[in-house]
Amino acid sequence: MIAFRKTAAAFGAELVTSAEPSAPAEGEVLIAVVAAGICGSDLHAYEWTPGYEFMAAVLPVTLGHEFAGIVRALGPGVTGLAVGDRVTCWPTVACGRCAACRGGEPQHCQARNIIGLHRDGGFAGTVRAPAASCRRIPESLPLEVAALAEPLSVAVNAVDIAEASPGDRVVVLGPGPIGLGIAFVAQLRGARVLLCGLDDGVRLNLARELGIAHCIDLAGEALADAVTRVFDGPADRVMEATGAARSVSDGLAVLRSGGILVVAGIHSGHLDLDLTRFVRDKKQLRAAHDTTAQAFQTAIELLTAHAAVLSRLVTHRLPLTRAVEAFELARQRQAVKVLLLPQAESEAA
Ligand SMILES: [Zn+2]
Ligand SMILES: [Zn+2]
């Protein structure tokens, strides 16, 4: 089968012909991948930016952790899944043995593995995954939309961590897939949302199509001015989804005293923080990463209930054979979610 693999600790990844995965082991299934999304972390791995050195020990590895497909084979001991089931997968595999896992908080497992970063993932015709990580999806949910479950679940978790209440003034920084998801979920829960980008016309237009109330390009207006104009006061919550450390300090500056800022971006830089002001204003700085089992389930339900509107997040679909082109597209900010379709023929999809 064809697979898109990170083969060297350097820029890039390669389309290779690799062996079909062997029969599934105890507790595992084989999934024929129908759609797999390119994530910001795939781009970091591809570009080999700092923070992804851990992958050097697992290379070569097939990328892709946002996938949906059809169960093709069951390993020994698998119950609750059948061949032919349509599934998506929570790609984080906790160790099951550490204190966090035993305490029912696998999201805090320090020995967790991610399918598509630590072990072979979904940019391939077939992927092997633990049955316990698979989630059956409703018949009405297209597999291409189901492939958005992982990134949307990351957004749901970030909004959960922000503890936003109906009526809260929420600023979302960064209109990428995660920021768009955060804005959508926060607004659905009754928050007043202002989504900001920087030279981000295409993605902000998509945000308007998703129904986000206020979408502003900071190329034309300073953040503080935009927040005052839209909210007539500071924000109750700021959600950072840019990956630029500077946006955290900018976000803190428009946050009310006692407000919460959630950092959800993947950062390679350091934060310079005015601690005097931070402490006097009792601002709360929190981190959101990955997701929880509950947020993953919520994401599937949201995708099912809002499939038509959320499917707009998918801006490009390409066969797996065009993976390099797809990655180059995803690196530009013209795209939101780029899907690879391993079962598609090589013509443009
Ligand atoms: Zn992802
Ligand atoms: Zn663990």
Image: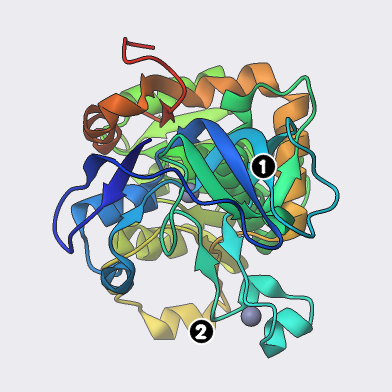
Measuring from the top left, give residue 292's x and y in whole percent: 69, 61
Mark 1 residue element: strand
Up-down relation of residue 123 to residue 294 (above or below): above
Residue identified by numbered label 1: 73
Foreground residue among 25 and 340:
25
Residue drawn at point x = 17 percent, y = 48 percent: 12
View quadrant of ligand 2: bottom right
* Residue 173 can be seen in this image: yes
Residue identified by numbered label 2: 279
Ligand 1: does it lie within 8 Å of the C-beta at label 2? no
Instruction: Pick whichever of labels 2 and 1 is earlier in the sequence.
Output: 1
Mark 2 residue element: helix
Up-down relation of residue 62 to residue 259 (above or below): above
Foreground residue among 12 and 302:
12
Relative to 169, is 22 on the left or the right?
left
Mark number, residue 346? none
Residue drawn at point x = 32 percent, y = 36 percent: 221
Outermost residue toward the left? 10
Measuring from the top left, give residue 189's x and y in whole percent: 76, 41
Write down the quadrant of residue 317 in the picture.
Answer: top left
Q: What residue type is labelled 1?
A: Ala
Q: Which amino acid does label 2 sit on?
A: Val
